[in-house]
């Protein structure tokens, strides 16, 4: 009787291996040869599961981003408005040591996105979803009377995104300029601005 192969599980294993290689040595370490070797495949066998390296990398990052989204949703569950917004902002900033690894990986992914339309499309979808979540919290905060600033919500959402991306970059390239105190002060000031009428 022929052996039954779980192709979905094999794709999942390849994605896991790719993520490990990226964490260990950056995106350039995740060559097709290294991915195949680590996953226990013959060289060239990956083509049966993915069309190329970018598709494998996209799978690895989608899993990571979805995982972050799930953890964030659990973190703010049962909260709304300005409270949910503040918790979300603090949760997604690269504060802990483990976040430094994630920041390095994400930075390498952004670089790859600059040269791959397929990868860029995937991250754009994530960013759209992330921004929509913050728009919802801002809308709820205004409904609750906690957010009174006249600054348009779209501008506030862009500020949140830029704050997070900027913190991620600094955490990687110049960590001595990044501290919990600095990040905490930025979030505290941002939330205070929302409560003030202009």
Image (tube, grey):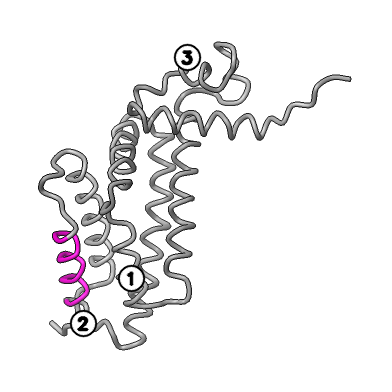
- Give the SS element for disc 2: loop
| Secondary structure under the numbered disc 1 in the rendered image | helix
Horizontal relation, residue 88 to residue 46: left or right: left
| Chain-order first, disc 3 or disc 1 | 3
The answer to if 188 sits in the magenta stretch is yes
User: Is residue 98 inside the magenta stretch?
Assistant: no
Choose the circle earlier in sequence order: 2 or 1: 1
Residue located 56% across and 26% down the image: 50
Distance of label 2 from label 1 (alpha carbons): 13 Å
Residue 156: name its quadrant.
Answer: bottom left
- Tell me the quadrant of the picture where the C terminus can be found: bottom left
Q: Is label 3 in contact with label 1 (beta carbons under 8 Å)?
A: no
Residue 37 in the image, given as x and y percentages of width and height: 52, 16
Q: Which residues are magenta?
A: 181-192
For residue 195, which numbered disc appears in the image?
2
* Residues at discs 3 and 2 in contact (Cβ within 8 Å): no
- Callout 3: SS: helix
Residue 14 spot, x, y in % from top left:
55, 28
Residue, disc 1: 85
Determine which quarter of the picture holds residue 184: bottom left
| Distance from Cα at disc 3 to Cα at disc 1 | 43 Å
Numbered mark located on residue 33 in the image: 3
Residue at horizontal 28%, vertical 85%? 146
Earlier sequence position, callout 3 versus callout 2: 3
* 95 horizontally vs 125: left or right: left
**Magenta: main secondary structure:** helix
Q: Tell whether 157 sits left or right of 123.
A: left
Q: Nearer the viewer, mark 3 or mark 2?
A: 3
- The answer to whether the residue labelled 2 contacts the one labelled 1, judged by CB atoms less than 8 Å apart, is no
Question: Which residue is found at the position 10% from the left and 48% from the top?
Answer: 177
């Amino acid at each position: 009787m022929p052996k039954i192969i779980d192709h979905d599980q094999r794709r999942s294993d390849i994605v896991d291996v790719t993520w490990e290689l990226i964490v260990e040595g950056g995106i350039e370490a995740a060559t097709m040869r290294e991915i195949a070797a680590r996953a226990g495949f013959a060289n060239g066998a990956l083509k049966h599961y993915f069309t190329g390296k970018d598709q494998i990398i996209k799978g690895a990052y989608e899993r990571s981003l979805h995982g972050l989204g799930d953890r964030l949703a659990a973190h703010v569950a049962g909260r709304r408005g300005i409270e949910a917004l503040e918790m979300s902002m603090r949760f997604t900033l690269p504060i802990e040591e483990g976040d430094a690894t994630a920041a390095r990986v994400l930075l390498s992914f952004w670089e790859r996105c600059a040269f791959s339309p397929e990868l860029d499309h995937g991250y754009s979808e994530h960013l759209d979803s992330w921004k929509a979540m913050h728009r919802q919290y801002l809308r709820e905060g205004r409904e609750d009377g906690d957010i009174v600033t006249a600054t348009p919500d779209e501008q506030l959402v862009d500020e949140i995104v830029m704050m997070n991306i900027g913190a991620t970059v600094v955490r990687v390239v110049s960590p001595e300029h990044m501290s919990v105190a600095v990040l905490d002060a930025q979030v505290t000031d941002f939330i205070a601005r929302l409560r003030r009428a202009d």
